[in-house]
Amino acid sequence: MNLNKSISIPEINHKYLPALSRFFSPIVMENIAQNINSKYLAEVCLNSGLMKQIDPEMSLGDFFDWIYSILFTCYRNEYIYKNVITNKVLLGKHSLNTSIMLSEFRVGKCKADVVILNGTSTAYEIKSEFDSFSRLEYQISVYLKIFDHINVITTILQASKLESILPDKIGILILNDRNEISTVRKSKSNKVNIDQNLLFDSLRKNEYLEIISEYFGDIPNVQNTLIFKECKRLFNKIPPETAHDLAIKVLRNRSDVDALCQFISVAPSSLSAYAMSICEESKKMKNLIPRFSQKLGSILVV
């Protein structure tokens, strides 16, 4: 289904929209992958009145695109933003062979909503109409210690507020009603300000070992209890920009590219962001693929 195409919005009590948005959550998707039917989907569709408006011959893939279109029109939550970024930026401008998107990437005490890694790092902080700006300044101050480019993506009504809140180097983007991302202000490179301590703490053991081995030629010959501390000490000796680039190189390996490409080729466009959230988990992707062609009538069983 073309997510840019306008559809007729079914009659639905808006109090059920948050429940519809959870159709795209990990727990619901995993349940669908493991079972032939989904009681949660069925119960929400029944209680909301959608069940009477559903064609049981519709495929599960088309159903997800339909629900997504309803949410895009009536309840533009964080998942909608993530999915647009995935389709328009990651898949629209880059290649899965050279780029990766990480969701909820840990940075100190924060989690960046979306990070795209290719030749550099670009963070996207989502502020939908349901989000406040209460933690935004703190979040941005943390992201400035680890990412090269940082963007805040929001609604057209909230964008003007951001210009006075955010530093000049932070980009401001808008998700418009045409399913497009427009730029209010472009981000500027921040790579020279990378804080190696914070960046190191966002890496897994195999990742920082690979970096230390590549840059210094070997890993420290110390006890296992001291390896983290010693590697961090060495990492801090690497020039900030070089440390950033080496980190990007290893972080891009957090993806099973072959499985992800296969999944994206058959999955509905509405699940692109979900695909990125399980980009390392080939088994989950493999289990979901045959579900997309199943008829909805066999899945929505109360």
Image (cartoon, grey):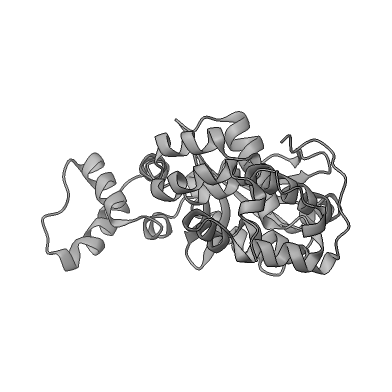
Taking the image as shown, residue 249 lies to the left or right of residue 106, namely left
Q: Is residue 214 visible?
A: yes
| Quadrant in the picture for residue 15 | bottom right
Return the residue nearer the eye: 212 or 31.
Answer: 31
Return the residue nearer the eye: 168 or 83.
Answer: 83
Count up the numbered dots: 0
Return the residue nearer the eye: 157 or 47.
Answer: 47
Residue 172 coordinates in the image, percent (x, y): 73, 47
| Quadrant in the picture for residue 180 | top right
In the displayed structure, 192 sits above or below 103; it is above
Q: Quadrant of the N terminus?
A: top right
Taking the image as shown, residue 234 lies to the left or right of residue 290, namely left
Question: Residue at position x 41%, y 55% from top?
Answer: 199
Residue 217 coordinates in the image, percent (x, y): 17, 40
Q: Quadrant of the C terminus?
A: bottom right
Question: Residue at position x 39%, y 41% from top?
Answer: 256
Question: Residue at position x 54%, y 32% from top?
Answer: 265
Q: Is residue 147 visible?
A: no
Taking the image as shown, residue 217 lies to the left or right of residue 16, namely left
Return the residue nearer the eye: 95 or 245.
Answer: 95
Residue 51 coordinates in the image, percent (x, y): 77, 59
Question: Residue at position x 63%, y 36% from top?
Answer: 89
In the displayed structure, 189 sits above or below 105; it is above
Residue 4 coordinates in the image, percent (x, y): 78, 36
